[in-house]
Amino acid sequence: MSENNQLRDVFDAIADPTRRRLIRLLAEAEEIPLHELTAQFDMGRTAVSKHLTILKEAGLVLDRKVGRETRFRLNASPLREIQDWVAFYSNFWSENMLRLNRLLEEEEE
């Protein structure tokens, strides 16, 4: 876990396609009420709320009450952990491909 004191691992939170879709929807808007998010899925409000809770526990979603309505917005900073992880392996594969290319070139000579 990162320095955010998250209750849930970010990788675990984004593992589910529904939660990745929720993140995408939240990234495309400044703030979205629960009923608008629920309308984007073939599941009930309770199921969407459970997914949002997991995202909140990972620090990816923030919410606030406006009257009787709950509005959600994305907090993308925890995604940096995933970006850093992917970047490491991107560099790993790039370096290995370069080594392989050099080896193949040496064998051709």
Image (cartoon, rainbow, N blue to C red):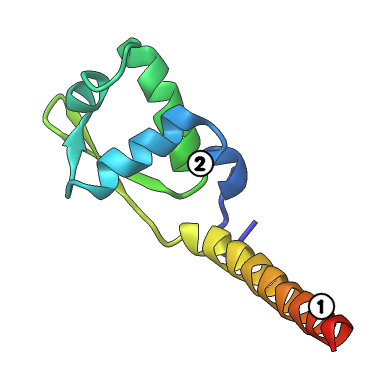
- Does the rendering let one see residue 74? yes
Q: Residue furthest left?
A: 67
Q: Going by the image, does 27 lie left or right of 96? A: left
Instruction: Where is residue 108? Give x, y as percent.
Output: 83, 82
- For label 2, the SS is helix
Amino acid marked by disc 1: Leu
Sequence order check: which comes first, mark 2 or mark 1?
2
Instruction: Where is residue 35? Give x, y as percent.
Output: 19, 21
Q: Which mark is residue 30?
A: none
Specify the quadrant that holds the N terminus.
bottom right
Q: Which mark is residue 104?
A: 1
Amino acid marked by disc 2: Glu
- For label 1, the SS is helix
- Does the rendering let one see residue 9? no
Specify the quadrant that holds the C terminus.
bottom right
Q: Residue furthest right?
A: 107
Q: CA distance from mark 2 to mark 1?
A: 48 Å
Q: Quadrant of residue 23?
A: top left
